[in-house]
Amino acid sequence: MFEAVAFYLFAFLTISMFYIAVTTSQALYAISSLAAGMIFISAFFFILGADFLGAIQIVVYSGAVMALYAFGMMFFDTTRDVKEKHGNKVIVIGLSIISAVLIVLIVGAPIVGSNIEALYPITEGAGNTQEVGMVLFTKYLVPFEVAAVMLLVAMISGIVLAGKKMDLSLTLMNEQEILKMREEDKTKKVLS
Amino acid sequence: MEIGLNHYLVLSTILFAIGLVGVMRRKNLLMLFFATEILLNSVNISFAAISHYYGDLTGQMFAFFVIAIAASEVAVGLGLLIVWHKKHNNIDLDSMSTMRG
């Protein structure tokens, strides 16, 4: 009973938050409702017994990703209204619902068809975090390391793309050169 | 009233449809990224639900990797978006119809 009430409450909240995030014309409303929706999604993970995944969801999404988006929004002009594509709305909504149903059918058909067995069954007497650690660092060690390398690549590319004057090194320049560079910066018009 | 696997899969489908509508109708690239996050999260819900109802931890593992991919996607995507905004002073999707840099 408690599970059902929690499920329907959070389902309603999540759907309404994501609907606002998708339909609003204000960027600030969109980012706020998206952050709220992410936190509500972590409630499903807690209901499902995936405690560690829920904590990670809160930390990564509403902590890191939303902060990154908020930081990125400082670069863009977010006060003006967001322009939308003016296509045929009925066709767009119909197509998206049909494709979503198709994806669920494609993914769900083998699960319903065959009685699958648990590859890494949940061990008795161990908490969720302990189980996750045991499986992640034994069976999924190589994908874990690959994901770590991918995050490193993403971090370096983010620094290189968003950084200014990456071709200059302040440690290799002497005082006069640095002062000259600063003077040039002041006279130049600041972009964005 | 018992909540089963199908409830979660239907919820995941609804959220995925919302995200898909967002991807189709948004013209601002930042809003397009928001819709992509919704898509990834809806898939995560179904992974966690299947993991719970089949007593298998593989679904949760894949959800972790999806979260890692989403985080790196945001980092790279926002960097590219900042570069584009410095160059063209807008982040509309229509301005990217040509592939010239």
Image (cartoon, coloured by chain):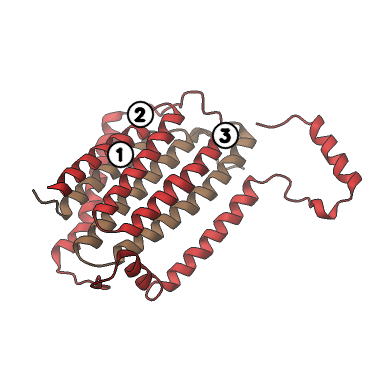
Chain colours: A red, B brown
> How far separated are the C-alphas under marks 3 and 2?
30 Å
Instruction: From this view, report whether residue A3 is shown above or below residue A50.
Output: above
Mark 1 — residue?
B18
Q: Nearer the viewer, mark 2 or mark 1?
A: 1
Mark 2 — residue?
A87
- Residue B89 x %, y %: 61, 31
Q: B10 or A113, which lies in front?
A: B10
Chain assignment, label 1: B
For label 2, the SS is loop
- Residue A170 x %, y %: 80, 50
Residue at 23%, 37% in the rendered image:
A12
Mark 3 — residue?
A74
Residue at 40%, 45% in the rendered image:
B36
Query: Seen in the image, is A71 located left or right of residue B67?
Result: right
- Outermost residue toward the right in this view: A176
Residue at 45%, 26% in the rendered image:
A83
Q: A47 or A99, which lies in front?
A: A47
Q: Are marks 2 and 1 in contact (CB under 8 Å)?
A: no
Displayed quadrant of residue B11: top left
**Label 3 is placed on what type of residue?**
Met
**Label 2 is placed on what type of residue?**
Gly
How crowded pointer 2 is (Cα within 10 Å; few <14, some 14-19, many 20+) is rated as few
